[in-house]
Image (tube, rainbow, N blue to C red):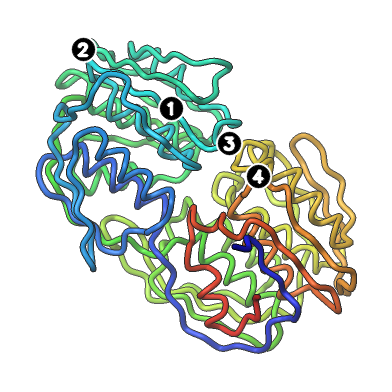
Amino acid sequence: MKNYVEINQKIKKFNKIISIPGDKSISIRFVLMAAMGLGVSRAYGLLSSDDVNASLKAISKLGIRVYKKKKYVEVIGQGLRGFAFKNKTVINCQNSGTLMRLIGGLVCKSKNSVVLKGDHSLSQRPVRIIEPLNLMGVNVKSKNNKLPIEIIGTDYLRPIQYKEINGSAQIKTLCCLCALNTPKNSISNIIAKNSRDHTEKLFKYLKIPIKIKKKGIYDFIEIKGGYQHNGFVQEIPGDISSASFFICLTLLSKNSSIIIKNVNVNKTRTGIIDLAKKICPNSIKIKNKKINNGEDVADIYVKSSKKFKAITPDPSINSKVIDEFPLIFLLVCKSSKISYFRGISELAHKESNRLKVCANFLKQIGIKVIEKKDSLKIYGNPSLNINKNIVVRNFMKDHRIFMMACVAGLTFKGSAIFKINDSDSIKTSFPSFLKLMKKIGAKIK
């Protein structure tokens, strides 16, 4: 069975209204918080992808019952201390860094240990959870700070005092989940560099005792231990990271427009909108805003852009656009000047080394770049028209690189044929990506 796609022609004019599958970050957090809850939790619109399914399998291995219905997924939580599993239970995180880094918050007080493993890509990435877990008294056995690792819980979980300096929402969330398991009324203090705040919003929605103060680029988070939340119902909005591919496709296409319904527009995730508005003025609007389970949800209106500006964004925005940088890089390719991105070394620690992979891809399609350890200069070319055949491979099956390459092939190509390998990578976050692209008129073989 072939595991690649071919793009032989640009996408033609389109004017469509679409919906995007559920947000991956929120879906995984629902699964884990529902497992820690007491009673029945139900999610509507839960993303059906490899990462989320790996999370559902993980809690099932911890003794939690999961029921998949046609319109919703139900999780029967047994409370913070209700997990039941054998010693050295193996959990396969597959490609999910979120699952790998958050699952410790569920098993941190368990007498039996869990062994975490993952696919080849995830096994190359630093786990980053050892230090905070050790500070709380949890033992982690690891070689070189990479998978596989063994997590051995403790009955004497200490409240954590921890400073997260990388802007990792995953490590911040791990600390928050562990804090729930500390003794009643104990206080954990987490100082975390600004990052997506889905966990904090969910804590507030569930009335879990949490206080947050923002000071500059850091959030000061205080959590009381020993609070048991009950089962809950959550509606999962569309994923803005997935919507971003259609936003950029529309901006780069001619005489086209799209409306993307019910998308999560949490301000810690809308860096793609903020930067795209600077690159393509007057081409994006956010309408029909509402609050859903504590999250901002809205419709995104996009029209083709006639002008593309170069940008040099302040690095303070990086955490808000970390997953969408490959698409931002594509947009500035159409500028007539130089764009400069700084402080982006975190891209090297994604599913692939996205900094290097993106730099190589841009060179491949004829764009001049200067790549350094934590920065990228892109020399735009408004006349970019690719006439030599392009083969995209060796990107560690990174789902976002595959989808970015599809957007490039549908908008930049001249007489070239794009062959993009590892089409199965989209199962990680957006299994219906190709189907939805074809729905709006993309000719992808």
Check whether the beta carbons of the residues at disc 1 and disc 4 lie within 8 A of each other: no
Give the CA distance from mark 2 to mark 1.
25 Å
Number of the front mark, 2 or 1: 2
Instruction: Name the residue tied to disc 1.
Output: 191
Look at 35% across and 43% down and name the residue there: 55
Using a 10 Å C-alpha cutoff, classify the residue at mark 1 as few (fewer than 14 neighbours), some (14 to 19) or many (20 or more): many
Q: Is residue 216 visible?
A: no
Question: Mark 1 or mark 4, which has the lower sequence index?
Answer: 1
Which three-letter amino acid code belongs to the residue tagged 1?
A: Ile
Instruction: Name the residue tied to disc 4.
Output: 396
Give the CA distance from mark 4 to mark 2.
39 Å
Q: Quadrant of the C terminus?
A: bottom right
Instruction: Name the residue tied to disc 2.
Output: 155
Which three-letter amino acid code belongs to the residue tagged 2?
A: Asp
For numbered disc 1, what is the local secondary structure? strand
Give the CA distance from mark 3 to mark 1.
32 Å
For numbered disc 2, what is the local secondary structure? loop
Using a 10 Å C-alpha cutoff, classify the residue at mark 2 as few (fewer than 14 neighbours), some (14 to 19) or many (20 or more): some
